[in-house]
Amino acid sequence: MAEAVKVEIENTEMIKPSSPTSPELKIFKLSLIDQLHPSFFTPILLFYSMDKNSTPASNKSQHLKLSLSRYLTLFYPLAGRIKDHSSINCNDEGIVFIEAQVNCPLSGILKQPPPVEVLERFLPGIDQSLEVRTEQPLLFVQENLFTCGGIAIGLQISHKIADAATIGIFLKGWAAVAADGSREILVPNLTASSFLPPMDVPLILPADAIKVIASKPTSRRLVLDASSIAALQAKAASSSVPNPTRVEAVTAFIWKHSIKAARLNSGFPKLSVASQAVNIRKRIVQSLPENAVGNILACYFVSVREIIELESLVSSLRKGLQEFSKTWLEHFQRNDPLSAFVGLLEQISGMPREGSTDFYNFASWCKMPLYEADFGWGKPTWIAIPRMEVYNAATIMDTREGGGIEAWLCLSEEDMALLEHDEELLAYATFNPSII
């Protein structure tokens, strides 16, 4: 199956805003948190099942490009280029739009989802080198047309301007424009830098603080249905956390079995540190609306060495979030967000280095309205967030029905091999099941 899937690029063009950006808006200030984020790109794939005779392929492409051009007038920084460490030049140079043909029907992908390296063919190819990132567009879009008439829309969006919530805002707004007035258009709020002003000289994350690139990383999709998640929530309950959330239970479950695999492969217990990303819209920065774009998130760290029972890990995650919320809220109430980030960087810098410690990075895209992205031909059948380069990482998101959770894991090949044969894990979760 994997070898048989061919994606042929037919056209590449630059999509620019339908109206030029006003002179007073030409320089967009990055926020404090934008400054701290590296310029790598975040991938997302949206698959749409459609009848071959519903809409001609050329009309679909034109529909997407015209609506995107119109929405870029509202989301104008995306059509610009990074100017320096604190700003984007909103020069309307545009985003890259690629049209591609796939040599198979979408049903083949949905019945037997291919490995991540095949899914990546549906994403725009970009140069991730540091030298190019400041010169590249901030958004790449690839429209993949299947022989059945189905479509996969692949996006690569710069993390310099977009966290997961921003991706959701962008997709919802673009889809609303494509709906031609049948839905209210979500106007992005671009004021984050006024609440989180950038620094003149940005803080630099220590390059060797946490290893995120593996020599042989491998990615897998892991799915838990609603009943399995409920069972994990019950199993993870304790006096300190009597009602674990879905995200807490699944995150702790993945962390537990990743620790188990790492310890079996290394032969000795290491300190295990988990980083959990937190959307701080409303939680911390009360004055920012939900449609505020940019990187409006932070993270907290929790660690364990010996105990890896589910309820203990959930308790650690909950305690870490409570301490994070209290500390960061105090900093923001004092109008001193910089101190919170300085403390975070100091915490990272003071962590034990590799060899004695395993680091895991967790992020939740749950409760984001990604499956609401209807461009006029229905909601997505499946959404995938494949990534290969970051390891010891897990990104979780809701399934289409909303009750289950899909986790995209990236671990070392050795650890992943043990996870795939972990009977306790397989009692609750399934590796890469069919979509349909």
Image: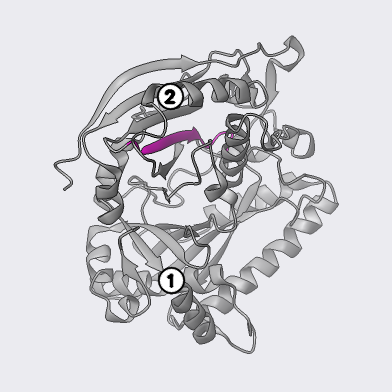
Q: Specify whether residue 269 is painted magenta.
A: no
Q: Nearer the viewer, residue 422 or 380?
A: 380
Tag shown at residue 225: 1
Which residue corresponds to mark 2?
61
Residue 7 image-quadrant placement: top left
User: Outermost residue, left direction?
Assistant: 3
- Which segment did they paint magenta? 149-162
What amino acid is labelled 1 in the image? Asp
Distance of label 2 from label 1 (alpha carbons)? 35 Å
- The x, y position of residue 262, in whole percent, is 31, 69
Q: Nearer the viewer, residue 129 or 432?
A: 432
Q: Does residue 54 appear left or right of residue 311 in this picture? A: left
Q: Nearer the viewer, mark 2 or mark 1?
A: 2
The secondary structure type at the circle numbered 1 is loop
Of mark 2 and mark 1, the one earlier in the sequence is 2
For the question of whether residue 87 can be seen, the reply is no
- The x, y position of residue 155, in whole percent, is 44, 35
- The x, y position of residue 430, in whole percent, is 32, 69
What amino acid is labelled 2 in the image? Ser
The secondary structure type at the circle numbered 2 is helix
Quarter in which the C terminus is drawn: bottom left
Is residue 251 shown above or below 92?
below
- The x, y position of residue 349, in whole percent, is 53, 52
Q: Residue at x 81, y 51 (%)?
A: 286
Q: Does residue 431 appear left or right of residue 297 in this picture? A: left
Q: Residue at x 48, y 73 (%)?
A: 226
Q: Residue at x 64, y 38 (%)?
A: 294
User: Outermost residue, right direction?
Assistant: 334
